[in-house]
Image: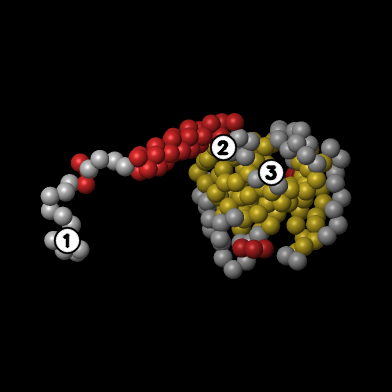
Amino acid sequence: MSAIQPPAEIVWWKQPLDKVEGTWISIALVWSLIMFFMMPFWHIYGKQNLSSEAYKTTPQAFLAKTEAMVQQYTVRTVNTEKGPIPVVKPPPGSDVYLAGRLWQWYPLLEFEKGQTYRLHISSLDWQHGFSLQPVNINTQILPGYEMVLTVTPDTDGEQTIICNEFCGIGHHLMLGKIYVTDGASMEVGQ
């Protein structure tokens, strides 16, 4: 017999299981079952996982819908290092369009607290990630697809939109805002 070759007569699956091995296998099995059942439970009862809809679109068609919304509901513009960006305040219950493009979210949005909106999000160029902070809503945004989230803001103030999928050299600058107000337009000077 040598240390390099296993014993010829032993079949490993026929050997008796040690008590410590059985304990760890049992712990791993129970934990995996808990995690398996927590995924659908947390999807249903967790607030951060919104059920969404997805539709096929083209970047040109989505940009046209976004520009039409911007033309109709712009309340002011905010000056940034990328230039002026419109702030759009659509009526509650309406469809709202948000476009991701290198390296910004367009336009900035203003919602009323407690009102429900259908937020349509799409990318005009690359894959982006939509992460709304501090609410912690996350979804992938792909060109050619329109993701629709039903959102009801429940706190006042600014919420930041972050791209959480690496989209190129300006990825770290891809920030957007959602201003949540009590109904009156919020003045922001930047």
Dot 1 surroundings within 10 Å: few (below 14), some, or many (20 or more)? few
User: Measuring 61% from the left and 63% from the top, which residue is drawn there?
Assistant: 171
Give the spatial CA distance, label 2 vs label 3: 16 Å
Dot 2 surroundings within 10 Å: few (below 14), some, or many (20 or more)? few
Front one among 136 and 41: 41
Can you tell which quarter of the image residue 174 is in?
Answer: bottom right
- Which is in the foreground here, disc 2 or disc 3? 3
User: Percent x, y for residue 5?
Assistant: 17, 61
Front one among 121 and 37: 37
Question: Which amino acid type is marked by label 2?
Answer: Ser
User: Which quadrant would the C terminus be assigned to in this image?
Assistant: bottom right
Give the spatial CA distance, label 2 vs label 1: 56 Å
Q: Mark 2 or mark 3, which has the lower sequence index? A: 2
> Where does label 2 land, which residue?
52
> Where does label 1 land, which residue?
5
> Where does label 3 land, which residue?
135
User: Percent x, y for residue 45?
Assistant: 59, 31
- Which is in the foreground here, disc 2 or disc 1? 1
